[in-house]
């Protein structure tokens, strides 16, 4: 399959590219300098000569707090860009895979605290979450041969080389080298996910014709405080992690209190779930350069 990989320099894109190639696909890496997804003319000018079978979009505006002040930019990138891709893919009969987020589930009333399924209504709040929800809905509505994959808290080795905004694991390791105590939020439950594991799952998914909406994270769940403690335990760093509330942390944008995703639909399509988060984290830390 000939695949145009948008966002190839990011954490997920960097793990996807070699795996797509190993699976026998002709993957064409496209960085932000190569394509501007918010410009329909540019998108057509770049993609049409490539004639891909699949467009795989990992690009996004993911500065959650900054999006509160840059609503128009977040909407343009996270909703307008995917819509442009969806319309072109539909007219050319190309497949499209678009990455979305667990943030579409936020602060629901009557929360049941059970993993969210693809059939649950989104409750996005905040400009980032709303823009991502709009983008995924536009893709599903305007491209009949599309996959939309919601995931959570991605971390990949490309962050070591400056890809994207970094990741939580690397932030904790950096802070742990600087101080002996760290305060971390303990009332948000989710499942941060290894980009290596997500990439493996996406390669399997695109080999099918099972188009639609999917949830894809590592298995299990934790709070950010629990995740931080496991990072330091595995890294053998003597750092005290002090639990705090979301209110105490004081971020500008609201975060989901509970955004654990039910990934059983994806597991049924690709032959099994993604690995447990403990295992994913251990492999990530073991693969970091000394």
Image: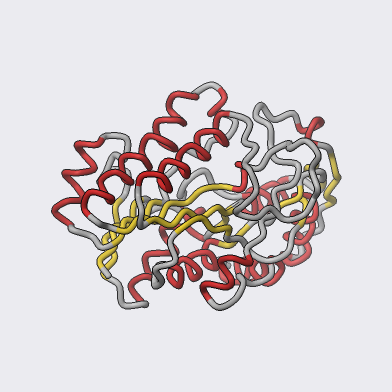
Residue 94 position by quadrant: bottom left
Which sits in the foreground, 64 or 118? 118
Tell me the colour scheme of the image: secondary structure
Task: Please give the name of the residue rendered at 85% of the width and 51% of the height, measured from the top-left corner.
Answer: 240
Task: Please give the name of the residue rendered at 68% of the width and 38% of the height, measured from the top-left corner.
Answer: 106
Q: Is residue 198 visible?
A: yes
Residue 194 position by quadrant: bottom right
Image coordinates of residue 14 in percent, x first then y, are 42, 60
Q: Is residue 8 visible?
A: no
Relative to residue 95, is residue 255 drawn left or right?
right
Extreme residue in the top direction: 69
68 in relation to 56, above or below: above
- Quarter of the C terminus within the rendering: bottom right
Which sits in the foreground, 235 or 112? 112
Image coordinates of residue 221 in percent, x first then y, are 74, 59
For the image, the number of numbered tags is 0
Image coordinates of residue 245 in percent, x first then y, are 83, 37
Relative to residue 47, is residue 22 drawn left or right?
right
- Quarter of the N terminus within the rendering: bottom left
Task: Please give the name of the residue rendered at 45% of the width and 40% of the height, measured from the top-left corner.
Answer: 135
Task: Please give the name of the residue rendered at 81% of the width and 31% of the height, measured from the top-left corner.
Answer: 248
Image coordinates of residue 196 in percent, x first then y, are 52, 66
278 in relation to 221, above or below: below
Extreme residue in the left direction: 49
């Amino acid at each position: 399959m000939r695949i145009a990989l948008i966002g190839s320099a990011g954490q997920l894109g960097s793990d996807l590219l070699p795996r797509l190639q190993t699976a026998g696909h002709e993957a064409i890496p496209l960085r932000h300098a190569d394509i501007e997804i918010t410009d329909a003319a540019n998108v057509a000018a770049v993609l049409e000569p490539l004639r891909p079978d699949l467009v795989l979009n990992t690009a996004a505006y993911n500065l959650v707090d900054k999006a509160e002040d840059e609503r128009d930019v977040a909407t343009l990138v996270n909703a307008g860009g995917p819509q442009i891709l969806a319309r072109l893919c539909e007219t050319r009969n190309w497949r499209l895979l678009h990455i979305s987020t667990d943030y579409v589930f936020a602060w629901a009333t009557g929360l049941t605290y059970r993993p969210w399924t693809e059939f649950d209504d989104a409750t996005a709040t905040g400009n980032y979450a709303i823009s991502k929800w709009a983008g995924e809905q536009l893709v599903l509505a305007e491209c009949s041969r599309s996959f939309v994959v919601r995931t959570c808290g991605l971390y990949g080795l490309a962050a070591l080389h400056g890809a994207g905004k970094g990741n939580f694991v690397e932030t904790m390791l950096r802070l742990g080298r600087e101080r002996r105590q760290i305060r971390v939020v303990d009332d948000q439950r989710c499942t941060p996910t290894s980009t290596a594991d997500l990439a493996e799952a996406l390669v399997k998914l695109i080999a099918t014709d099972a188009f639609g909406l999917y949830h894809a994270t590592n298995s299990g769940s934790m709070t950010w405080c629990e995740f931080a403690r496991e990072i330091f335990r595995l890294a053998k760093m003597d750092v005290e992690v002090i639990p705090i509330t979301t209110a105490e942390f004081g971020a500008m944008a609201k975060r989901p209190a509970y955004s654990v995703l039910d990934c059983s639909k994806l597991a049924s399509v690709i032959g099994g779930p993604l690995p447990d988060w403990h295992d994913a984290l251990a492999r990530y830390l073991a693969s970091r350069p000394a």
